[in-house]
Image: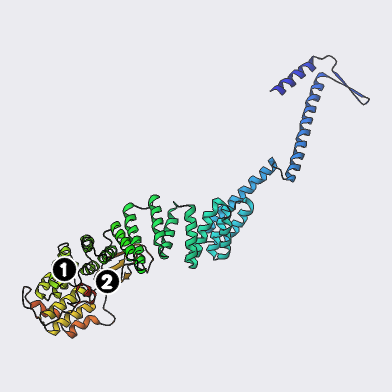
Amino acid sequence: MAAIAGLTYGAGILMDTDGGIRIAVAGYEATLGPLAAAIAVIVLMLGLWLVMKLVGLVVAILRFLNGDETALSRYFDRNRERKGYQALAEGMIALASGEGRVAMSRAAKAEKLLGKPELTTLLTAQAAELVGDSKRATSAYKALLAEDKTRFVGIRGLMFQKIEEGDAPTALKLAEKAFALKPKHPGMQDVLLKLQTEAQDWKGARATLGAKLKAGALPRDVYRRRDAVLALQEARGVFEEDATVEAREAAIEANRLSPDLIPAAAMAARGLISAGKKKDATRVLKKAWGARPHPDLAAAFAEIEPEEAPAARIKRFRALTDQHKDSAETQMLLAELHIAAEDFPVARRALGDLATTHPNQRSLAIMAAIERGEGSDDAVVRGWLARALTAPRGPQWCCDTCQAIHAQWVPICENCGGFDTLSWREPPEGAGPSATGTELLPLIVGTPMAAQTLDDDSEEAAPTAKPVADPEDAELVGPDEK
């Protein structure tokens, strides 16, 4: 506005000047009228402005060539950045589409245009993994270790590579470093916990589990159960070192954390028995049986008084058998106790109709022992035993994830690697006849159905007959009764 006002004022003065303006330069003289003078001034100022702009352009080009930041350099930078992000986007789309080599080429182009390794190097590593170029992927992940903001990503990538290669010790060390960088990362917590349990680092696994609880990634009840599982494994490790005091304390701690964890209760009871604390062992097993009857609990309960008479054992076992009276486990336990006491009619009544309504190998073997003890024909006994050959085994330790069956409880499924996935239940039975045709054995060796005619309330017994005991239940019988 000031320039326009100045030009207007100057033009007004020239218009008021009489005779115009006389200009003399190097012997030349010119006289300009007021209008011509005004036009000449405007042209002169435009010329000066153009000269200044040309000079500024020349200076900018020289600075650009020198590497200084200028408007020209900023233009080229924006153009390069736009092309770089376009290449990066194309690379990510190619990676998601499974086109690894296309993704790698786009990542290389984006790296050249953007100069941001935290973006392009990661894309390169993932694309290299997709095409199976582990060497290039390793190199890319190692490059990410140089910067603080990408170190976690680099360590995590190298860790998964080692897991894929089967190098569990190195993977565990990398997982520990990544966990130290981001202790609240849920995925990292799970991977570290899995690697620690596979390496049987129970103490470290308990610390990781505590971190999951603090981070809010685990409900408290689930935490207590899993912490008990890990404490139980610690106790087993101490048992192996023959340090019974430490083992007893660790087992009791595991049982305290989760009283319904059957292996922990059995181990805690045995630790208390070895310390001479039979009442405490009885209390632990009684509480665990109340949560869920299990043969391992009954076996541990029998170890409290291994030399007792059968009648005394039946009386003492009432602490267990008075609970869950309708449970199949309680019924079979009572039947076995009375078989050991050679009271076969009572054993039959205790077993009830389990052998026919819900038969399994154990209930059928118990029924065969009762028939033998009552003096039934050999054909009847063989019939029950033949049925036992083809009957389901009954409850077992089954993985809830993959349905794999385990002979003993373990914290990690040996088939799928699941943590704390085993439960005591009947596995799903396959349909169809057996490959050996053993389902025909009852027709060959005899049928147990003749035993159905016997009076359930009969008091007759064969004192000289010895019962056929199930080998799995031998622990329930003292040395004098075997």
Q: Quadrant of the C terminus?
A: bottom left
- Dividing the picture into quadrants, the one containing residue 431 is bottom left
Are there few (<14), some (14-19), or many (20+) residues within 10 Å of tag 2?
A: few
Q: Residue at image x 36%, y 66%?
A: 237
On the question of residue 431 being in view, the answer is yes
Q: Which corner quadrant of the image does residue 100 belong to?
A: bottom right
- Residue at image location 11% in from the left, 84% down from the top: 377
Q: Amino acid at mark 1?
A: Gln
Q: Residue at x 51, y 54 (%)?
A: 152
Colouring method of the image: rainbow
Label 2 belongs to which residue?
429
Locate the N terminus and report the quarter of the image it occupies. Answer: top right
The x and y percentages for residue 328 are 18, 67
Tag 2: amino acid: Glu
Q: Determine the image quadrant of residue 143.
A: bottom right
Point out which mark residue 155 bears. none
Residue 353 in the figure: left or right of residue 213: left
- Nearer the observer: mark 2 or 1; the answer is 1
- Front residue of this view, candidates 314 and 440: 314
The extreme right residue here reads 27
The disc at residue 331 is 1
Distance between the Cα atoms at labels 2 and 1? 23 Å
Q: Position of residue 129 (x, y in %)?
A: 53, 63
Question: Can see residue 427?
Answer: no
Crowding near the residue tagged with mark 1, few <14, some 14–19, many ≥20 C-alpha atoms within 10 Å = many
Q: Is residue 289 above or below residue 364?
A: above
- Left or right of 461? Residue 470 is right
Dot 1: element: helix
- Contact, mark 2 vs mark 1 (Cβ under 8 Å): no
